């Protein structure tokens, strides 16, 4: 049977014999560490399970369609979720309290 040799002249069997204890030591150290916990997200700190959960709650709280909340949130970005988005939703809610929005009148396209 043909065995390939490493540059130092050792073969794969010798390499495995030397490296196996190191691999086992690392594996044992990793499993002995305390459970790794993920850092709490900004949404969890405010009592929501995720950004999507936050958006659903904002939709219900402000009476704004969820698709509108998603559109505004994407437009503003995550950094504005607790500031600009809330302001935009309050403005939207206030505008809709004044009755139905007027339909846009579009001019016909001219060539």
Image (spheres, rainbow, N blue to C red):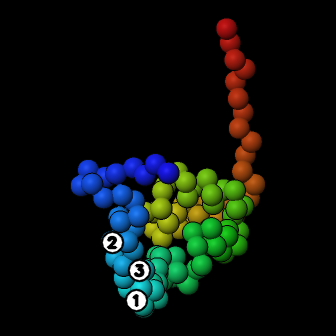
Q: Which residue is mark 2?
A: 18
Q: Outermost residue toward the top?
A: 111
The residue shown at (72%, 61%) is 65
The secondary element bearing badge 1 is classed as loop
Q: Nearer the viewer, mark 2 or mark 3?
A: 2
Q: Helix, strand, or loop for circle 3?
A: helix
Residue with the mark numbered 1: 33
The secondary element bearing badge 2 is classed as: helix
Residue drawn at the location 52% of the way across and 63% of the way down: 85
Of callouts 2 and 1, the N-terminal one: 2
- Indicate left or right for 14 with 72 as reference: left
Of badges 3 and 1, nearer the viewer stands 3
Between circles 2 and 1, the one closer to the viewer is: 2
Visible residue check, residue 84: no
**Front-most of residues 49 and 101:** 49
Spot occupied by residue 43 in the image (x, y as percentages of width and height)? 52, 76
Q: Quadrant of residue 94?
A: bottom right
Find disc 3 in the rendering and name its residue: 24
Mark 2 and mark 3: span between their CA atoms? Answer: 11 Å
Quadrant placement of the C terminus: top right
């Amino acid at each position: 049977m043909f065995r390939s040799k490493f540059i130092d002249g050792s073969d794969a069997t010798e390499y495995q014999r030397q490296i196996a204890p190191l691999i086992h030591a690392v594996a044992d150290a990793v499993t002995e560490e305390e459970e790794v916990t993920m850092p709490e997200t900004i949404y969890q700190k405010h009592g929501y399970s995720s950004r999507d959960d936050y958006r659903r709650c904002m939709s219900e709280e402000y009476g704004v369609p969820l698709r509108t909340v998603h559109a505004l949130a994407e437009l503003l970005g995550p950094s504005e979720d607790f500031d600009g988005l809330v302001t935009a939703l309050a403005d939207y809610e206030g505008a809709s309290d004044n009755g139905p929005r007027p339909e846009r009148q579009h001019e016909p396209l001219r060539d």
